[in-house]
Image: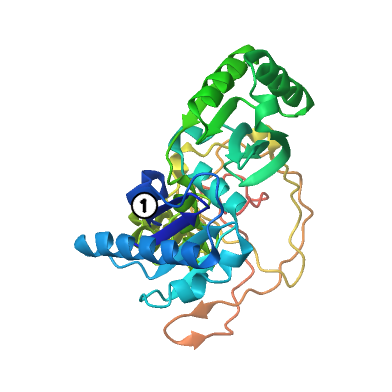
Amino acid sequence: MREYLGIAIDDDFVSTALVDADAPLLGAIDAFGRRWGEAGTVPSTSASARALTSAAAIATERASRAELHPATVGVVCERVDVSARVPDALSGFSFENVELVDGLDARMAYLHSVDALAGAGTCLAVWSDGDESVLAAIDPALGEVNWAHRYITDEVFVSDDMCSGTVKSMVSELDPVPSILVAMGTTDAVRRMCAEAAERSGMGFIYLGERAQLAIGAALVAASARAGDDRVLTGGVGAGSAPERRFRPVMVWPILLILTGLLIGLLFTLTPKGISTSTPDRSKDTVVPSTLHYTPRSPMAGEQQPRQEQSGSPSASGTPPLVGALPPCDPVVEVTPAALHRSDPDDGPSTTAIPTTAIPTTDNHPDPTCIPLRQG
């Protein structure tokens, strides 16, 4: 919780408001106002400074009863001579910072704290300023004034027709068209006329009659200036609050999923390409005989004859023998094969020549002139 004090003073009324900057939509924690001076008169500078000091003393005492001690105060004072006396008037308090706040900024900050205007878009606001009335097209969410006019109060709010005509003429010039007409602290007569004008123009109507609205806005502006950003005025959480630093566990799951995916990809990348995780079923392999092409030839001198294997035995490479898939052997020219050399695994290489005798006729090779294809 960050408590801030706001004070608004004019020639006949002074108001104070204690605001929690971490929850601006809740409004004032404590507020009070009182009339001072005489109506229609302009108080002296010294009298206004004393009234400001008295209001600050009452506000801080009320806050201390709730164990709240605001360190920053925002002051709205339209009189230049009184504004110059504000630092001296509040020098006897333990305020660390005193902010002079413009009245328009205070009104915009207060309108932004009104929950009923959240998401309303452009609004048409009406408020009194002395003998004049201000009609302004504002955007509370952005804190911007798009268009504004000042009128003599007695000329505009003299009748329902005059007020409705003025509002309609303003609405016709605005783009986008305001959706709500807001009356801020006006008299009962002006409030009734504004409600009638809003109904005729097809707009909604909201009346904000709190007298401490300028003090609330001043406290919010001072809180924003103290924090060094505009999160207080844009509905965000103020600096140093717990929700801003709170850890959100929901962000852990996306991080774990990403790390898991990276780990799986790294394992696949580091796996040797020669290793297969599945065993192929070779029994399902088929050989289409029509796709095989074989061209027999006679062994030349110096070549080693292919080693014959018994039919029906699997080949060295594991491929089943091609039974009935070989074309018949072509006639072979009679040649004298070269001497073959045989290696004995126990005694080492041997150069004993094998006699060049004719290949015996066996059941495996019924045709002595045909050298079968070496399987595999």
**Count the marks: how many?**
1
Which sits in the foreground, 355 or 174?
Answer: 174
Q: Is residue 140 above or below residue 124?
A: below
Residue type pointed to by label 1: Val
Please state if 177 lies on the left or on the right of 208 as rendered.
Answer: right
Q: Residue at x 57, y 44 (%)?
A: 366
Query: Can the viewer see residue 64 in this picture?
Result: yes
Question: How far across and how far down the image is residue 28, in percent?
Answer: 36, 49
The quarter holding residue 57 reads bottom left
Which sits in the foreground, 259 or 127?
Answer: 127
Which sits in the foreground, 370 or 109?
Answer: 109
Please state if 30 lies on the left or on the right of 359 as rendered.
Answer: left
The quarter holding residue 44 reads bottom right
Looking at the rendering, in which quadrant would you find the C terminus? bottom right
State the scheme by which the image is colored: rainbow
Q: Secondary structure at mark 1?
A: helix
